[in-house]
Image (cartoon, helix red, strand yellow):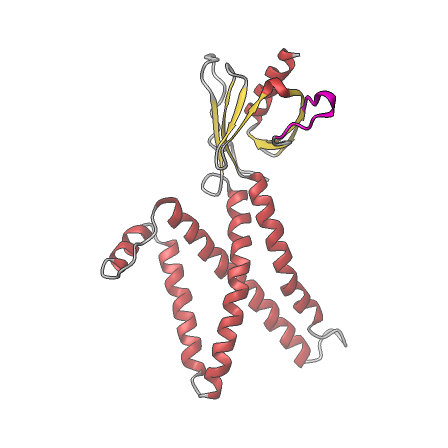
Amino acid sequence: MEDANVNAAAPSGDESEPIRWRRDASTSRTVWALWSLGVGTFFAAISIVAFWRVYDLALQLGLGGIVLAAGAGIIATVLAFALTENTEQRLQRLTSRLPVSSPSGRGLERATDAALGTIAMMAIIVSLMVAGRVVSQNGLLGGIGAGPFTGLAAITIPLALLALVLASFLRSVGAFDREEGAIYLYDPEQAVDLDVIEAVSIRQVGSVAVLTLTYIERDGTYVAGPRRLVVPPAVAVAVQDVVESNR
């Protein structure tokens, strides 16, 4: 499911050193793929509808070929910028004479990921639509027609939403301070004091671990905080050791 250890600091003999980790689209192939394809699906659906409207109008004016060429040129340009090694420098040169600022750093990385995901999903959705049209026009698959292909194209939207939810769940950036007995999460910022945790369970999936936290709820009082965290296995084991030693 996951690539090798994702920027997780392994526990050392120095117990005062926090264990830090980062699992996001820049360090995890799984999170990257889910986020890129999820966002890309929505952009692809919007782009296809908009392009079809423009192309339909252009056909009536005898300009269909020009619109197709323009669309292919835009896709080729986006791919050229996204796949080059010096994307940031090229964008800066392109926008240097324009009254806009070019994205950089993580913003540029996410924009590139979204662009690649959009192009990939456009190719998939358009392929399904073309296949459905060919099957329907040639009477293939009996009387089924284009229904299965149209359904597969339509189901990409709820699947994209699911992919974004999974990407959000699998994304995790934080640190575990064993001396303070606390887990610190970033983006959004949140702290979990292990003194209010009575038990933890670990379920390892590939090279990551799903850490389930059980809070101490005295007199039925609900304790706010995350119930499940996705962390490197080293972090999960360290948290479990501290909770068990506090019992």
Q: Which image quarter is the C terminus in?
A: top right
Q: Quadrant of residue 94?
A: bottom left
- Residue 195 vs residue 52: left or right? right
Residue closest to the far left: 97
Q: Is residue 21 above or below residue 70?
A: above
User: Magenta segment range?
Assistant: 215-224
Q: Is residue 50 above or below residue 102?
A: below
Q: Residue at x 75, y 73 (%)?
A: 144
Whether residue 64 appears in this view of the structure is yes
Q: Quadrant of residue 157?
A: bottom right
Q: Name the spot of residue 12 as percent of width and height, x first.
A: 47, 16
Give 72 or 107, whichever is nearer the viewer.
107
Determine if the magenta segment contains residue 39. Answer: no
**Chief SS of the magenta region:** loop
Q: Is residue 101 above or below residue 57?
A: above
Q: Residue at x 53, y 71 (%)?
A: 49
- Residue 148 vs residue 15: left or right? right
Q: Quadrant of residue 132?
A: bottom right
Q: Residue at x 70, y 26 (%)?
A: 221
Q: Which image quarter is the N terminus in?
A: top right
